[in-house]
Image (cartoon, rainbow, N blue to C red):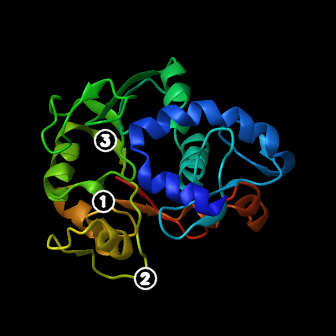
Amino acid sequence: MKKLFKVVLNTVPRPLLITLSYWIKPFFKYALRGNKYTDPIDGKSFSKFLPYGYINQRENVLSPSTLSLERHRLLWLYLKNETQFFSKNLHVLHFAPEQAFYKRFRKLKNLDYTTTDLNSPLADVQADICDLPFKDNEFDFILCNHVLEHIPNDTEAMQELYRILKPGGTAILQIPQDLKRKHTFEDDSITNRKERERIFGQYDHVRIYGRDYFDKLRSIGFNVKEVAYTTQLSPEELDKYRLAKGEVIPVC
C-alpha cells in the first residue's frame, strides 16, 4: 500500500486527487474500523491510519475519515482548545482549504468564511497570494498552511498576508520546517523535478524553512508566537491522535 500511495501522490494532479478522495474514503473507513486511534476532527476511531508521503512514506498518519494529517489534527486541537475560533464572530480567509476543514468551517455560523487559491476546486476566490484582491485590514483570522513553501517570492506573500490582516487579528502560517536547520535553504537553479523531490522533499516545493522562518515573519511586522502545542499534550494523546511530537505552530 505504501508504494501505491507514493505513486498516486506523485502522478495524479492535486485537483483530481481531491475529487477521487471523496470516492475512496468510505472504503478505507470500513476496512480500518477499530478503536486504537482517533481523529479528533470528527471523533471517529480506527485500528490504524493510512501511510502518507511524497518521498519518505510515514506510516499510520493519514486519517481514513477526514484525510487529515498530523498537522491538521494538531491545528484542530489548538483552535478548539486555545482560541475562540469556534465561538467568536470572525471574518476568516482560508488559503488552499484543506479537505479535512473545508465543510466543517463552512458550516460554522459564527464565521464569515472565504477560501482562496490559484488552483483548488474548493476556492471561492481564484487569486495569487502575492497580489490579493482584498482590502487592507479586512480579515480577523487567516489560515495559510503549507502554502508558502510553494511560493517563489514568499516575502511578497507574507507582506500581502500582513496587509489584509486586521490589527489584533490572527494568522496561522504553518509550513514544513526543519527545526534543526538554523537557516532556510532555497536554490532557484534546481529545476529538475526529481532533484527538487530529493532536496526539498516534494517536487513543487521551492525551499526548506529553518528556524529563521519566525524571524522573517517578525521582519514583515507580525508578532509571532512559536507554539509548541504538542508539549501540552500527554504521550497517550500524541499516540491516540497520531500527532508529530515537537511540531511548532506559528501563530502571528
Q: What residue is at 48 percent from the left and 64 percent from the top?
A: 248
Q: Residues within 10 Å of mark 1 (few under 14, many from 20)?
A: many
Q: Residues within 10 Å of mark 2 (few under 14, many from 20)?
A: few
Name of the residue lying farthest toward the right: 35
Three-letter code for the amino acid on which mark 1 is drawn: Glu
Which of the two discs, 2 and 1, labels the residue nearer the N terminus?
1
Neighbours of disc 3 within 10 Å: few (<14), some (14-19), many (20+) = few
**Foreground of the two, 152 or 213:** 152
Q: Which mark is residue 168?
A: 3
- In which quadrant of the rendered view does residue 194 lie? bottom left
Asked if marks 3 and 1 touch (Cβ < 8 Å), the reply is no
Residue 100 appears anywhere in the view: yes
- Say which amino acid is labelled 3: Gly
Per the model, the C-alpha gap separating discs 3 and 2 is 31 Å
Could you say where residue 62 lies in the image, as x and y percent from the top left? 63, 52
In the rendering, which numbered label is found on residue 149?
A: 1
Residue 180's tag is 2
Judge depth for marks 3 and 2 and give the one in front: 2
Mark closer to the chain start, 3 or 2: 3
Q: Position of residue 121 (x, y in %)?
A: 37, 29
